[in-house]
Image (cartoon, helix red, strand yellow):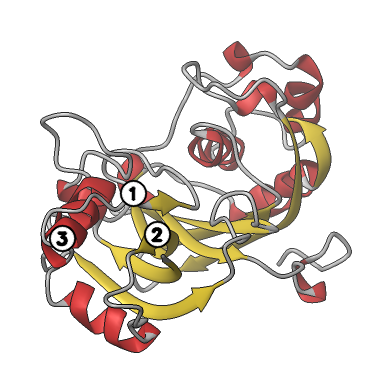
Amino acid sequence: MTRYKMTMAYDGHLFHGFQKQPNQRTVQGTIEEALEKMTKGKRVVVHGSGRTDAGVHAKGQVIHFDYPDKAGKVIPAQNMMLAINSQMPTDIVFFESEIVDQNFHVQYSTKGKWYRYIVDQHHFTDPFNRFYTGHFPYPVNVELMREASKDLLGYHDFSSFAASGGQIVDKRRTIYYVNIDQDPDRKEIIIDFIGSGFLYNMVRIMVAALLEIGNGKRPVHDLKRVIEAKNRQEVRGTAPASGLYLYHVFYEEIPEKYRLDHKIY
């Protein structure tokens, strides 16, 4: 068996999330079906770096799988990528492939993840962007959001930002970097988060809280209180899945420019 590590992008709109589920179209299930055809009926299990929810997109999701060698011959990584891409629907594409050691695990070998959230600020929902942004048509002060985002940096218990249904008991994580940009021409706000890991719906809940601060519904440093409360009821909102992208997965140390001492805007 040869272990392949592959990086992919997908449009999550028509997928019921990454994780394989009965009678649902999922990213994992789609890839495994293709691999089963390639192996002529042998099951190949696909492991993902994380489980994106229904409607969430990926620019840099990473998977690994063990593929049976044919007569002792190993398929080169580039050929494997070409073969899988030929089997993929148009809403999935692989763009990096390499052969890795059997000790590598796509989930447990990670050093951190980068998520991006895109907020559409048009008054009415843009019909061409409705599946790729989260709509928030209310006025916001981006400078207040930037100031508030500093309170997320560091090592905290993020229980207040974890949706019910998550199975992880230890909710302590480190947020290394937050960046908030505004594109006035497109009427979009782009929010980037880099952290050691993220809890179930954590990014979408943080985005909801930051938008409430930008809109004046919360004091600028209210996130300090919310973190200390360790209570999900302190932030009841969750930004829509459509605006969330798994942007990059780090397997080396987080670059210094994204560490805690880096300016966030």
Q: Which tag, 3 or 1, sits closer to the chain's start?
A: 3
- Residue at coordinates 15% horizontally, 67% vertically from top-left? 38
Residue underneath mark 3: 34
- Residue at coordinates 63% horizontally, 49% vertically from top-left? 108
Q: Which tag, 3 or 2, sits closer to the chain's start?
A: 3
- Tell me whether circle 2 and circle 1 mark residues in contact (CB < 8 Å): yes
Q: Which tag, 2 or 1, sits closer to the chain's start?
A: 1
- Residue at coordinates 72% horizontally, 44% vertically from top-left? 148
- Between residue 112 and residue 73, name the one nearer to us: 73
Q: Secondary structure at mark 2?
A: strand
Q: Is residue 69 left or right of residue 253?
A: left
**Amino acid found under the numbered disc labelled 1:** Val
Residue underneath mark 2: 65
As drawn, the label of residue 45 is 1
**Amino acid found under the numbered disc labelled 2:** Phe
Mark 2 neighbour class, 10 Å CA radius: few under 14, some 14 to 19, many 20 or more: many
In which quadrant is the N terminus drawn? bottom left
- Between residue 119 and residue 36, name the one nearer to us: 36
Q: Is residue 49 left or right of residue 134?
A: right
Q: Position of residue 140 (x, y in %)?
A: 51, 47
Is residue 150 in view from this perspective? yes
Q: 72 above or below 11?
A: below
The quadrant where residue 191 appears: bottom right
